[in-house]
Image: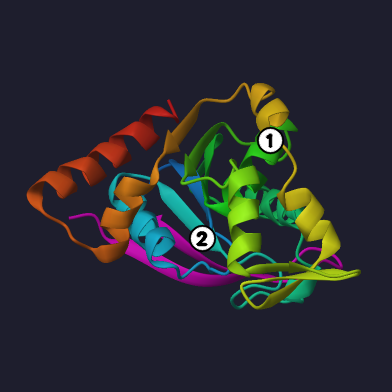
Amino acid sequence: MRVIRQQKIIISTGEAPDLAAVLHLPDTLGEFPVVVLCHGFGGSKNSRVIAFLAHQLVKAGFIALRFDFSGCGESRGNLEDLTISSQEQDLARVVAYTALLDLADTEHIGIIGFSMSGMVAVNSAADSSPSFDALCLIAPAVNKSGYLQRCLREGRLQRFDDHIVFDRIRMSLQFYEEWFRDLHEKGREISKPTMIIHMMLIMIIQTYNITTSHTKKIKGLQGIIKQLLP
């Protein structure tokens, strides 16, 4: 069985808030493709799906890095200052960090964006910065018009003159405007290998209801991600 080394790290660059992260490394010599895992809204690097996938990826021969966006989890910063643009900057910093790792195969760096961070990953891939080679979107929050209307009806989303409140969390108007921006045009600009995973598999992982058939699906997920990084 492949042994996994796990390290808590801080990614610090200039005046930007420090980002807390966990680095997962195979305990063998060589160069390994890298996967950066991005959590969803209200989550963190320790979310079940993110932590589970990090361990599975290392077992499959990858370096995995999961991190907290600014203002989330253990990272510095204020959650109210969070925007899609600031998350893109965080992601660029993390990818730049992975490219400096001794064991990293810098020609094979992939991104996994979960839920809202799927939108962050799409924007980053379309802008060709940061420099990464493949993209995996898990239950990405890209079809937002119907979702917005439902949140308003249910009272989960309230808009005020200078801020919004979403699921009882105060956020900036810039976050709101960027979050509900149409991503279809951005999506057409992506030239990187891209995979989209829908919610059913993720529900299986979250509940850890791992039957034989489910285990096959998860192992298949490893194989598909590996194919994205030829």
State the image quarter where residue 32 is shown: top left
Asked whether 202 or 163 is in front, the reply is 163
The residue at which mark 2 appears reads as 66
Residue 80, relative to residue 184: is it above or below?
Answer: below
State the image quarter where residue 192 is shown: top right
Asked whether 13 or 73 is in front, the reply is 73
The extreme left residue here reads: 212
How are the residues colored?
rainbow
Residue at (59, 51) in percent of width and height: 147
Stretch of the chain drawn in magenta: 1-26
Give the percent coordinates (x, y) of residue 148: 65, 53
User: What distance separates the C-alpha of mark 1 from that of mark 2?
Assistant: 24 Å
Q: Mark 2, residues whose alpha carbon is within 10 Å: few (<14), some, or many (≥20)?
A: many
Residue 11, relative to residue 226: is it above or below?
Answer: below
Residue at (73, 69) in percent of width and height: 158
Horizontal side of 177 relative to 9 (left or right) equals right
Horizontal side of 193 relative to 76 (left or right) equals left
- Residue 28 is at least partly visible in this image: no
- Residue 223 is at least partly visible in this image: yes
Residue 215, relative to residue 170: is it above or below?
Answer: above
Q: Amino acid at mark 1?
A: Leu
Q: Amino acid at mark 2?
A: Arg
Asked whether 12 or 155 is in front, the reply is 155
Q: Main secondary structure of the magenta part?
A: strand
Residue 223, relative to residue 113: is it above or below?
Answer: above
Q: What quarter of the picture does the N terminus occupy?
A: bottom left
Label 2 element class: strand
Point out the frontmost of discs 1 and 2.
Answer: 1
The residue at which mark 1 appears reads as 183
